[in-house]
Amino acid sequence: MEKAVHLTGMAKAELESFVEGLGEPAYRGRQLFGALQRRRLRTFDEMTDLPKPLRARLAETATASTLTVESRFVAEDGTRRYLMKTRDGLPVETVFIPEERRDTICFSSQSGCPLQCDFCLTAKLGLLRTLDAGEMVEQIVVALNDAYGVGRQAPRGTNLVAMGAGEPFLAFDPLMKALRVMADPDGLHIVPNRVTVSTAGVVPKIRELARTPDRPHLAISLAAPTDELRDRLMPINKRWPLEELLAACREFEESLRAGERFTFEYVMLDGVNDSDAQARQLANLLNRHRLRAKVNLIPHNPADELPYRPSTEERVESFKAILESKGVHAFVRRPRGRDIYAACGQLAARRVSNVNAPALHQLS
């Protein structure tokens, strides 16, 4: 049986062509785009502005949703983690982080991850599959509908971070397509300037992103100031070691917009990469490459399966002070949703007991 066409990842022009192939006028494609993206509808039956015969034909040949929400977990700090399944039964996780002035949705680009970073629980899954553009967009639709109601506008701004499961730059083409679809002013209208993509250091794609019009912001997971340590913590470093990675970052700086800086993320592992000497090594490394990036210090989010502990608060502050004394802008990123395995590096399709979670309504 032929797989139904997934419409949620299609741009407006693609939907126009799709409905014309069904013998319908192009404006029906624009209506369909608005229903999927602006009104955030996930079934054709809800799209009552479309003729009933067209809705019936769409149901025979296409689908508006492929992700099924299995569980929603709510942390004490209000963070929500959604555990979903693809139509081929693979786990997808998305995190909604409410904040006073904006909300952030952390979405996944892959089910699992192939990179085997030693401090990341997601690595234990391995790579199951790269997600398509529609599966990425759907994650945002699910989170917004749950937080605010179907089709209701978010009262605060919405930022997106491609920092969930997977390496986004190994899903570069579907990711860029998803971002273009979400940027459309007739749809979700989440523009690239409100999106950050995090990579472990896929150097060719860093260079490609620099050449991409209307690109998102860039964040790079670093985790170590030397190749010897980074080889152990992040095996991707054996393919693109620090000197090559930072040279690409220096090239990327040429594409920065006024007032923009990219970000290095540095997970803080107790007794592993958090000494004063390593802080000085990191500052010297960045200064030698004349990089204007900021550094986000992220205390490690622990799990029983991982052999690491988070650095103490005092150690993190000391590390930060040394970076700043050498002219490196540094910030501490506080964990969110750690108690429901929603924090950075914890996404591994975990089911946990969660008394805070209200009943799932019509999310799937």
Image (spheres, rainbow, N blue to C red):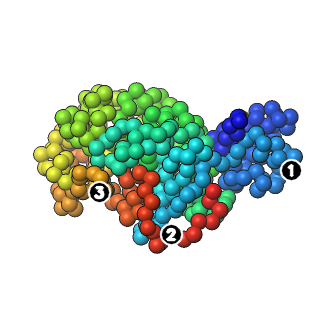
| Residue 319 falls left or right of residue 352 | left
Residue at the (73%, 38%) spot, across then down: 15
Q: Identify the amino acid type marked 2.
A: Ala
Residue at the (50%, 37%) spot, across then down: 130
Q: Which residue is mark 3?
A: 304
Q: Nearer the viewer, residue 310 or 246?
A: 310
Residue 74 visible in rendering: yes
| Residue 4 falls left or right of residue 238 | right
Helix, strand or loop for disc 2: loop
Between discs 3 and 1, the one toward the N terminus: 1
| Residue 213 falls left or right of residue 44 | left
Helix, strand or loop for disc 3: loop
| Residue 110 falls left or right of residue 29 | left
Q: Which residue is mark 1?
A: 52
Q: Identify the amino acid type marked 1.
A: Lys
Q: CA–CA distance between discs 3 and 1? A: 53 Å
| Quadrant assignment for the C terminus | bottom right
Q: Which residue is mark 2?
A: 357
Relative vertical location of residue 204 with respect to residue 82 in this rendering, above or below: above
Relative vertical location of residue 245 with respect to residue 357 in this rendering, above or below: above
Which mark lies nearer to you, 2 or 3?
3
Q: Nearer the viewer, residue 179 or 82?
A: 82
